[in-house]
Amino acid sequence: MLKVTIDEQTLEVEAGSTVLQAAQRLGIDVPTFCYLKRLPPLASCRMCLVEIEGVRRLQPSCATAATDGMVVRTNTPLIEETRSSMLDMLLANHPLDCPICDKGGECELQDMVMAYGPRESQFRDDKRVFHSEDIRLSPVIIMNVNRCIQCQRCVRMCEEVVGAVALGTVEKGMDTAVTGFEGSLASCDQCGNCVEVCPVGALMSFPYRYKARPWDLVETDTVCPHCGTGCQLTVGTRKGEFMRVRSKWDEGVNHETLCVRGRFGLDFVASRDRIKQPMIRQDGALVPVSWDEAGDYLRRRLLAVESKDAGGLASPRLPNEVLYQFQKLMRTVFRTNNIDCSSRWAAPFDTLGPLLGTFYSRTPLDDLIGNDCVLVVGGNITEENPVTEYLLRDGARRRQTGLLMLSARPSRLDADARVVVRVPPGGEAASLAAVVAGLVAAAGQALPGGAFADIDRPAAGAGSDGPPDRLAAALKEGRSVTVLVSVDLLRSPEARATLQQLNNLLHVLRLLGKGPAMQFLFDRANQMGAWDMGVLPAALPGLRAVADDTARATLARNWGAEIPSEPGADLDAMLDLCVGGRMGALYIVGTDPLVAYPDRNFVTRALGAADLLIVQDAFLTDTAGMAEVVLPAAGYGEESGTFTNNEGRIQNVRKFREPVFEARGNLAIVDFVAALRNQALRPSTQPEIFDEIARLVPAYQGLTQDGLGADGAFTKAAPTLSAGMLPAPPPVPTAADRLMLITGDCLFHNGYLSERSDILNTVANDPYVAMSAQDTAELGLSDGDQVIVRSGQGELTAQLKVDRQFPKGLVFVPENYRALRLNSLLRRGEYPCAVEVQKAHATLEVDRPGRIWRGV
């Protein structure tokens, strides 16, 4: 530790700390413009200059390392004069348009001038003007370059954190101007992080422009609803109307950054597609009724189907308290464990449970990224979890973390990775088995016992210097390892095998002393919470097996009702019950399986065959359109609760507007349904339910809602018995001689909730089909062509997007566009799906699936 004295105050700091960091620890205000905590110092604005004893010139505190015995002064007459002169230079060409500038009231230049600026300017020349009118760089970002103070925050944020390199500078000196390529940001992520870090009104949010002043806004700190990263955001409303989103440096996992969905995608709360009042089906049509009428009708219908099975499906975007209460309703009132929380894939609890209990690390992602190696398995992190990608890029570039990528789809993070392994969809299990084999072979006698005696050579298909071997070598060299797993892997029929091989890999790494940690990369805001709350057919709250007599007895004693002892049906099995005429009441809350389930024909037939379909939602979804009873629920921002993010961090989700029309809170509706069965759920209010969760769910024990604070609190790992080790590695998938369709999230949309955002729809790509340059060349297709994608189930038409990084043989269509009806092409249990691709409105002959030749 080093001793430093600043303004006659002495403290100890770690080696490598800067003078600015030391001053901030002492609470001494040193002004800055170009400095950002998460970026290397630039020292260009010269506002943070300080005097250091023994040094002739003033030094920039942001870039000056503290040394032992250093004596610093931050407020001498020379420093004050220098700061004033610097501000005078900035004001020399700065337009005096504060009354109309969107940054007015929260402008750092304004604040600096008030605190340190000259009372009278020394400059008398005409102000330089770059442009007489503001420039619309994109649908969401507008620029007034005349206000720019050349701090370079926006350019550096875009390049070094986001990785988009969409902004740059032209000219030099006082004529430097920030701009996008050819005055446009058409190719950028539209995340708006440049707007967030701009200290003045040079870069502004177009959707927020001229709507409100900061002092007019009521601001509410909450959590983003779009993916499992769990970013902190601050929502500004004016007279109850949504205005904007911003974020704070010192709160949450995201450190001020947001993706395009988080910053610009919250206007979906004001969607015109809201369900206004309860509806029941009469003469084949949904008819609006009162809540009392809906209750009377539903009571009769529930009684009529009581002798049959019941089932429940809830969205992983709902708060923990709603999810907990919903599974309690199903288990105690409907007397069933037929519960699920995903309409896109099944979670095999027999392998998932041990993996979560043994290796899931409920710790800050920032700490895990500090490990020597981070292996990212599956998915496309750039588009599924953008802010997590920012953190990983920071780890690779600034902390020398070794990034290792294993996936079917490329991502922008590949450019920062040490090893990139492309595998066919479903081939992750075989590749992981080869990595395990490589580690065991390389470790030799270092591994104890005979647990790995069955593995004496790499899995089939792994060469002596193949990609899995390079992964194994990198993992063996690292001192500590983090494994981040895309939940996208659960789409594959090979999901169970992949989870087993992940379990094996983590066991081997532990035996090698690597201290492995694992986290999922969920693409839904509260998927971790949904699992923790027990919205699973085979798991109770706390991820305890339904067959666990002790766990079941504890809950039954507290709930005052017995819980069925047999595991229930997941969504797949529930749909089979529907088709077989055995499903009485199917209760769906906040999700749309008709659009999301990977077989539209089957799910349409199944939902239509249920005796009673109840849908509780904020929006009139396709599934709601098939329901017999529709109950209007509060949407995001209209009720308080908690989310649990990928890290296992539980955070407050706060209400910032009132429910609209006749919508009721989700908890109130669950109580309403329970009362129709002449039962009551206690407790029934959000704070009381949180307290019960903290008492009965092991990972949440001891938590209090008041104790969550701005950064939330971490739940605890709840160890479970390990699964059996090293099942036989699956065979390596053979390369298909036809095109295979895969799906997933795209950058601008996440599920179908974000499609209700008018702002996102202005920046999002049109529905598209991504293919490799090699495949498109063989098929005679060009970027931008309208193409038809056809499977044995159906077809769709969309614009072709040629991706030079995309692997040959794959076709990617994002799952986020309702109009495409992508799931019409898919068949349950088959993923990926074989397809043909051809140019729309062209006469083509098909030689064999995926091989299409021009007609002759």
Image (tube, rainbow, N blue to C red):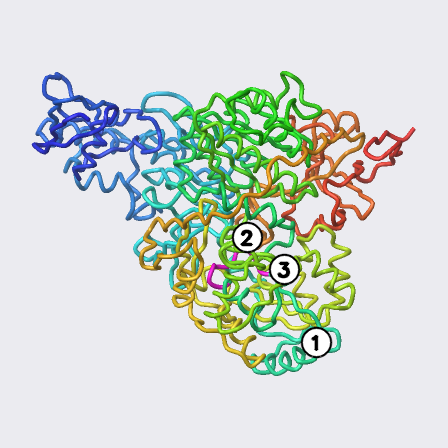
| Residue 843 relative to residue 670: left or right | right
Q: Earlier in the sequence, mark 1 or mark 3?
A: 1
Q: Earlier in the sequence, mark 3 or mark 2?
A: 3
Q: Nearer the viewer, mark 3 or mark 2?
A: 3
| Disc 2: which residue | 758
Q: Residue 796 placed where, x, y %?
A: 76, 45
Q: Residue furthest front?
A: 449
User: Label 1 vs label 3: CA separation?
Assistant: 19 Å
| Disc 3: which residue | 567
Residue at horizontal 48%, vertical 32%? 510
Q: Earlier in the sequence, mark 1 or mark 2?
A: 1
Q: Residue 451 placed where, x, y %?
A: 58, 32
Q: Quadrant of residue 656?
A: bottom left
Observer-nearest residue: 277 or 447?
A: 447
Q: Quadrant of residue 833?
A: top right
Q: Secondary structure at mark 1?
A: loop
**Above or below — where is 28 with respect to 558?**
above
Q: What span is in magenta?
A: 314-322
Observer-nearest residue: 304 or 175?
A: 304
| Residue 377 relative to residue 46: left or right | right
> Which amino acid, by three-letter code, is at mark 1?
Ser
> Which amino acid, by three-letter code, is at mark 3?
Pro
Q: Which mark is residue 384?
A: none
**Above or below — where is 90 with respect to 57?**
below
Q: Residues within 10 Å of mark 2 (few under 14, many from 20)?
A: some
Q: Residue 358 placed where, x, y %?
A: 50, 43
Q: Residue 732 placed where, x, y %?
A: 71, 30
Q: Residues within 10 Å of mark 1 (few under 14, many from 20)?
A: few
| Disc 1: which residue | 307
Q: Nearer the viewer, mark 1 or mark 3?
A: 3
